[in-house]
Image: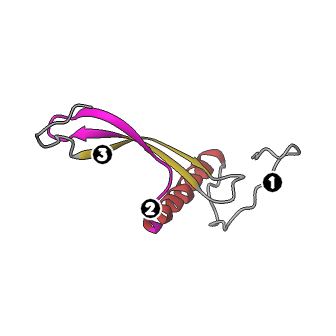
Amino acid sequence: MTKSGGRSVIDAIEIGEVDARIIGVPSLVVSVKYALVQSSTGSRFGAGNMNVGWSAETLRKFQEFVAAAEADICANVFEDGPTTAGGEVNHLDTMDGIPGL
């Protein structure tokens, strides 16, 4: 390992990809890929992945995002768009136990 005596130029994080498992799992699973960035230049120096440790606020806002996205999809798919706010939905699994829509 080579160690530097200077300060790090990495001072920011950029999220590049979000993956969420909502259907067919016991609880919400959110995985985020992010880049380590020098904000003054935009240079990226590496990447990381965070799967656990989300705050209650982040999870609440993610659930708000899911509800808003479902409403947008509903408006796009159905002529009358969303008419009611749904509660928690219990999605059925397929015969082989693999979660399905």
Above or below, comparing residue 1 to residue 71 in the picture: above
At 49% from the left and 62% from the top, the residue drawn is: 59
Residue at horizontal 32 percent and vertical 43 percent from the top:
14
Are dots 1 and 3 in contact, CB under 8 Å?
Answer: no
Residue 4, image x, y percentages: 15, 36
- Inter-mark Cα distance, 1 to 2: 27 Å
Q: How many numbered discs sit on the rendered protein?
A: 3
Q: Residue furthest right?
A: 95
- Among numbered discs 1 and 2, the one appearing first in the sequence: 2
Per the rendering, the mark at residue 92 is 1
Range of residues picked out in magenta: 35-56
Horizontally, residue 63 falls left or right of residue 78, namely left
The N terminus lies in quadrant: top left
* Few, some or many residues within 10 Å of mark 3 (<14, 14–19, 20+): some
For numbered disc 2, what is the local secondary structure? Answer: helix
Q: Is residue 62 magenta?
A: no
Q: Which residue is mark 2?
A: 58
63 vs 37, left or right, is right
Is 45 one of the magenta-colored residues? yes
Q: CA distance from mark 1 to mark 3?
A: 38 Å
Pointer 1 or 3: first along the chain: 3
Instruction: Give the residue type that dot 3 points to.
Output: Ile
Give the Cα separation between the discs numbered 3 and 2: 16 Å
Q: Quadrant of residue 67?
A: bottom right
Disc 1 to disc 2: CB gap under 8 Å: no
Secondary element type, mark 1: loop
Identity of the residue drawn at 75% across and 61% down: 90
Would you place residue 67 above or below residue 94 in this image?
below
In the picture of the structure, the residue carrying the numbered disc 3 is 13
Bin the neighbour count of mark 2 within 10 Å (Cα to Cα): few under 14, some 14-19, many 20 and up.
few
Q: Residue furthest left?
A: 6
Q: Is residue 49 above or below residue 87?
A: above
